[in-house]
Image (tube, rainbow, N blue to C red):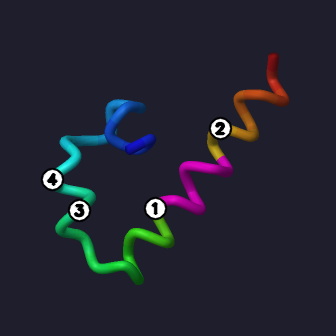
Amino acid sequence: MVLAANGYGPVGFWLKMPLSELHKWIAVNNQILEERRNEE
């Protein structure tokens, strides 16, 4: 999983998370990645 690969915790942590919470984390992670791309 991308979130685990980005160093945000083990895959098991993300797999146990309710989908409603996971959706929020993914949205924020995507925003951060987009900001990093724009800075380069």
Give the mark nearest the N terminus, 2 or 1.
Answer: 1
What's under tag 3, amino acid-wise? Leu
Q: Nearer the viewer, residue 29 or 14?
A: 14
Q: To which residue does mark 2 refer? A: 33
Question: Decide: marks 3, 4 in contact (CB < 8 A)?
Answer: yes
C-alpha gap between disc 2 and disc 3: 21 Å
Asked which secondary structure carries label 3, the reply is helix
**Residue 6 image offset from top left, x and y in percent:** 41, 32
Give the mark nearest the N terminus, 2 or 3.
Answer: 3
Q: Residues within 10 Å of mark 3 (few under 14, many from 20)?
A: few
The disc placed on residue 12 is 4
Magenta extent: 26-31
The residue at the point 74 percent across, 40 percent down is: 34
Q: To which residue does mark 1 refer? A: 25
Residue farthest toward the top in the current orientation of the protein: 40
What's under tag 1, amino acid-wise? Trp
The residue at the point 26 percent across, 58 percent down is: 14
Give the mark nearest the N terminus, 2 or 4.
Answer: 4
Q: Note whether 12 is above or below 8 in the view shown.
A: below
**Residue 20 image offset from top left, x and y in percent:** 41, 83
Mark toward the viewer: 1 or 3: 3
The disc placed on residue 15 is 3
C-alpha gap between disc 2 and disc 4: 22 Å
Asked which secondary structure carries label 2, the reply is helix
